[in-house]
Image (spheres, rainbow, N blue to C red):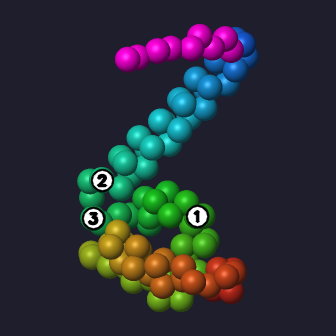
Amino acid sequence: MESSIPLQVSDEFKSNYYELFYELSKEAFEAAKRDSGAGRFMTKKQCCEFIGISFGHLQKLEKHGLPVIELEGKVLVDREDVIKFMSKYKKIENIKQII
């Protein structure tokens, strides 16, 4: 037996709900696109976007051991290396200790 209860909500609530749903969907789509198959190897710019940091912060991470690959003058970063490197610092209460 199925029953329903009518629920009236304001136009403002509907608008806020749709806006929130849109933003969450957009973020999920962008994360899936970024994480899926954008390629294992990234340029430094792509790496910065992947992690969500500035180029200067990426250089600091390199100084602290983030591996990079240099091929014929082009510098690439392995997505798996980034994930491993960042995972090492998950337990640090204040990541600014290395940045």
Residue at numbered disc 2: 36
Q: Main secondary structure of the magenta part?
A: loop
Residue at numbered disc 3: 40
Residue 73 appears anywhere in the view: no
Q: Do callouts 3 and 2 mark residues in contact (Cβ within 8 Å)? A: no
Q: What kind of residue is marked 1?
A: Ile
Counting other residues with Cα less than 10 Å from the Cα at mark 2, is it few (<14), some (14-19), or many (20 or more)? Answer: few
Residue at numbered disc 1: 53
Front position in the image: 45 or 4? 4
Q: CA distance from mark 1 to mark 3?
A: 19 Å
Front position in the image: 65 or 73? 65
Residue at the spot x=43%, y=49% of the render?
31
Pick out the residue farthest to the front: 1
Q: What kind of residue is marked 2?
A: Ser
Q: What kind of residue is marked 3?
A: Arg
Q: Position of residue 77 (x, y in %)?
A: 36, 72
Which image quadrant is residue 30 in? top left
Q: Secondary structure at mark 2?
A: loop
Q: Quadrant of the C terminus?
A: bottom right
Q: Nearer the viewer, mark 1 or mark 2?
A: 2
**Segment tinted magenta in the rendering:** 1-9
Residue 3: in magenta span: yes
Residue 95: in magenta span: no
Q: Is residue 13 left or right of residue 70?
A: right
Q: Is residue 92 left or right of residue 66?
A: right
Residue 57 appears anywhere in the view: yes
Counting other residues with Cα less than 10 Å from the Cα at mark 3, is it few (<14), some (14-19), or many (20 or more)? Answer: few
